[in-house]
Image (spheres, helix red, strand yellow):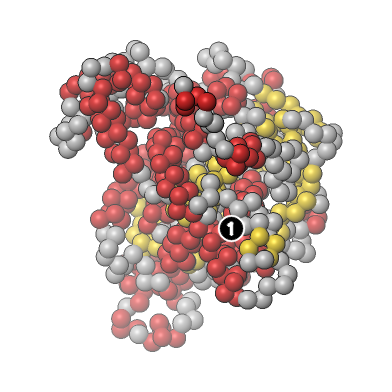
């Protein structure tokens, strides 16, 4: 009874909790919609379309402190977890972009100051790579304990869980589904089972550590397969009762961009926000004189009517 | 990973009672355990009379998984590994080295794409020669179309402008270079899996001997092995392709080997040429380079299609 009358938390804790749940704006290029922890953002695009770049840039904004030694850096001052399923992440690029960001801030010439800040930020970036779905599940199952350790060591909590890219093992898992099941009680569709387990584990981790999830997904089907007449050629559509691979046509600016959904429905239902990135048509004309490339980004869920042009330069991504 | 039965000897907590309990949930192996919701398992264990012992068993399994898995790395760890082990290997052609910021990066998978007779094999032979000569490292060359030519390598060695190298005629420099290039003729994807797995085992056992490390792994051409298994209705072809990709990236990353593969071009929808192997393969390589050859001047142009830190469209020329 006494315990019931006692408050659950004091005002400070409550404020911290409320602030945590409040939506926040990520820095560009993901600034279109306010996001909150617990949201799952899917970043769709062909390869290459600067998806990993966008992740790196967002990661840098998260690991940078807001103020440090009386200098304004405007970061979010949190940890970032990066799960690399494509095994293509290049740390040198992240380090380069981070250096640019630190240099950008005027008024600091002290090399030591920069070096300490750089090291602090780099140690807040947590990375792991996986070569197959089981390793991915292992990672998620044990992530809670590992994160707890890191959060205690750093004294700050993690803000974003990045997955690059979620469909990496799609083909391998699909083929595993065709192996004869060892006993009849098992579900036949392996990729379905794996996705269910993955979603389940991510839910659990984000319950313990409130985080925003950003996952990239490469479009692995070519445009022509999405055309309705050709879909029938693909046999697996027939044995797909859950209608999990719906073809979508997105028309914008008189340009039909088509991608076909291939992730199981359980993952699709888990996603709360969807963003499409693609290479911009006119990039070839412009990119001759400088080391930069152009991409377009548009929000599919929730639908925003404007698409943005992104420029990737040495220093990072800029919105045109 | 193993069936639970085989764990019994090493971990006494995984006893027959625990196994029977797991079997009642359809869990026979560590993989099954990974796919299962741990919370459900724990709450079900609470209902049993031996709940404490069962819980210990579950924790034991979790810690086995944890020990199997690689640790969560911070950005600093990654950077250190990258600086220490993932140098770029010079290709022997200044233009290309400048284009790629030093050459072929160890730990990365580089893909050369080009139409027939655009100089892909010549580039492979040239790069192999340079690495064998300059870095004293061994080169594994998987030849899938009988295109490997020792004469051509002898020619490249003879071209060498390195005076020290030419002076030591009695040391048989050519012999040494050729000794370091190990060529395998591979004609099917399964043979390639065999060779790569064997290579992985060898590399792991020789990890601490550093006299003649494997620095470069070349597959010329990877597309000629993969194209025959693609197509058809099932996902098996694509699964094998992605598995090869992951195996190559694993070798590259774990053993600090630079991997170079070649891919041919096929006719696209609108009459233009495009790289073979389609959209799914695009997610595999770190770096993608398009090769084209000007027949009159006999120069090869290397242009970047995809790179973690460089914009696409940049190009360099070289005579092979």
Q: Compared with residue A140, is residue B121 higher up or lower down, i.e. above or below?
A: below
Q: How packed is label 1: few (under 14 Cα within 10 Å), some, or many (20 or more)?
A: many
Residue beneath disc 1 = A94
Q: In which quarter of the image is residue B307?
A: bottom right
In this rendering, would B106 be left or right of A316? left
Label 1 SS: helix
Q: Compared with residue A36, is residue B107 higher up or lower down, i.e. above or below?
A: below
Residue B34 image position (x, y, % from top left) = 37, 30
Residue B52 image position (x, y, % from top left) = 25, 26
Task: Kindly identify the residue that appears in the image at 28 percent across and 28 percent down.
Answer: B55
Q: In which quarter of the image is residue B188?
A: top left
Task: Kindly identify the residue that appears in the image at 30 percent across and 20 percent down.
Answer: B45
Residue A242 image position (x, y, % from top left) = 56, 15
Q: Can residue A23 be seen in this view?
A: yes
| Furthest residue toward front | A2
Nearer-the-camera pick, B298 or A218: A218
Task: Kindly identify the residue that appears in the image at 41 percent across and 59 percent down.
Answer: B256
Task: Kindly identify the residue that appears in the image at 60 percent across and 75 percent down.
Answer: A111
Q: Mark 1 lies on which chain?
A: A
Residue B168 image position (x, y, % from top left) = 35, 85
């Amino acid at each position: 009874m006494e315990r019931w009358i006692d408050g659950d938390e004091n005002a400070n804790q409550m404020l911290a909790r409320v602030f945590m749940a409040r939506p926040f704006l990520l820095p560009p290029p993901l600034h279109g919609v306010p996001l909150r922890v617990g949201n799952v953002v899917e970043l769709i695009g062909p390869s290459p379309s600067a998806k990993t770049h966008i992740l790196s840039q967002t990661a840098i904004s998260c690991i940078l402190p807001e103020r440090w030694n009386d200098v304004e850096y405007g970061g979010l001052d949190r940890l970032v977890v990066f799960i690399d399923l494509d095994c293509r992440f290049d740390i040198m690029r992240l380090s380069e972009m981070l250096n640019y960001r630190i240099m950008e801030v005027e008024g600091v010439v002290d090399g030591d100051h920069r070096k300490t800040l750089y090291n602090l930020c780099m140690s807040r970036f947590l990375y792991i790579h996986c070569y197959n779905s089981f390793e991915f599940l292992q990672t998620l199952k044990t992530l809670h304990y590992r994160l707890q350790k890191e959060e205690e060591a750093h004294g700050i909590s993690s803000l974003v869980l990045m997955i690059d890219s979620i469909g990496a093992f799609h083909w391998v898992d699909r083929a595993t589904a065709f192996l004869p099941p060892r006993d009849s009680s098992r579900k036949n569709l392996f990729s379905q089972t794996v996705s269910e387990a993955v979603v389940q584990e991510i839910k659990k981790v984000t319950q313990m550590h409130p985080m925003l999830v950003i996952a990239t997904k490469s479009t692995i089907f070519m445009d022509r397969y999405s055309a309705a007449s050709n879909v029938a050629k693909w046999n697996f559509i027939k044995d797909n009762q859950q209608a999990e691979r719906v073809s979508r046509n997105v028309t914008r600016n008189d340009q039909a961009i088509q991608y076909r959904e291939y992730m199981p429905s359980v993952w699709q239902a888990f996603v709360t926000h969807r963003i499409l990135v693609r290479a911009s048509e006119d990039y070839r004309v412009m990119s001759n004189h400088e080391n930069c490339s152009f991409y377009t980004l548009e929000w599919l869920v929730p639908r925003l009517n404007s698409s943005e042009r992104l420029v990737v330069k040495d220093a990072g991504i800029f919105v045109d | 990973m193993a069936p639970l039965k085989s764990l019994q000897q090493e971990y006494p907590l995984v006893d027959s009672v625990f196994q029977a309990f797991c079997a009642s949930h359809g869990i026979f192996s560590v993989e099954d355990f990974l796919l299962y919701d741990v919370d459900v398992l724990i709450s079900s264990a609470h209902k049993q009379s031996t709940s404490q012992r069962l819980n210990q068993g579950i924790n034991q399994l979790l810690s086995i998984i944890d020990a199997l898995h690689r640790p969560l790395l911070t950005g600093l760890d990654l950077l250190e590994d990258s600086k220490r082990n993932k140098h770029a290997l010079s290709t022997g052609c200044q233009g290309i080295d400048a284009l790629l910021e030093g050459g072929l990066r160890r730990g990365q998978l580089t893909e050369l794409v080009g139409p027939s007779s655009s100089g892909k094999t010549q580039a492979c032979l040239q790069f192999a020669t340079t690495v064998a000569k300059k870095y004293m490292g061994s080169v594994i060359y998987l030849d899938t179309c009988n295109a490997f030519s020792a004469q051509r390598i002898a020619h490249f060695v003879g071209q060498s402008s390195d005076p020290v190298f030419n002076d030591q005629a009695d040391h048989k420099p050519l012999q040494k270079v050729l000794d370091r290039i190990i060529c395998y003729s591979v004609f099917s994807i399964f043979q390639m899996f065999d060779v790569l797995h064997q290579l992985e085992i060898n590399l792991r056992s020789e990890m601490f001997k550093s006299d003649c490390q494997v620095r470069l792994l070349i597959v010329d051409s990877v597309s000629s092995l993969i194209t025959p298994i693609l197509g058809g209705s099932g996902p098996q072809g694509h699964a094998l392709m992605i598995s090869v990709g992951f195996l190559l990236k694993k070798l590259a990353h774990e053993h600090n080997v630079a991997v170079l593969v070649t891919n041919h071009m096929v006719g696209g929808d609108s009459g233009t040429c495009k790289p073979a192997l389609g959209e799914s393969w695009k997610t595999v390589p770190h770096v993608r380079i398009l090769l084209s050859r000007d027949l009159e001047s006999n120069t090869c142009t290397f242009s970047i299609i995809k790179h973690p830190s460089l914009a696409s469209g940049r190009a360099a020329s070289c005579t092979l």
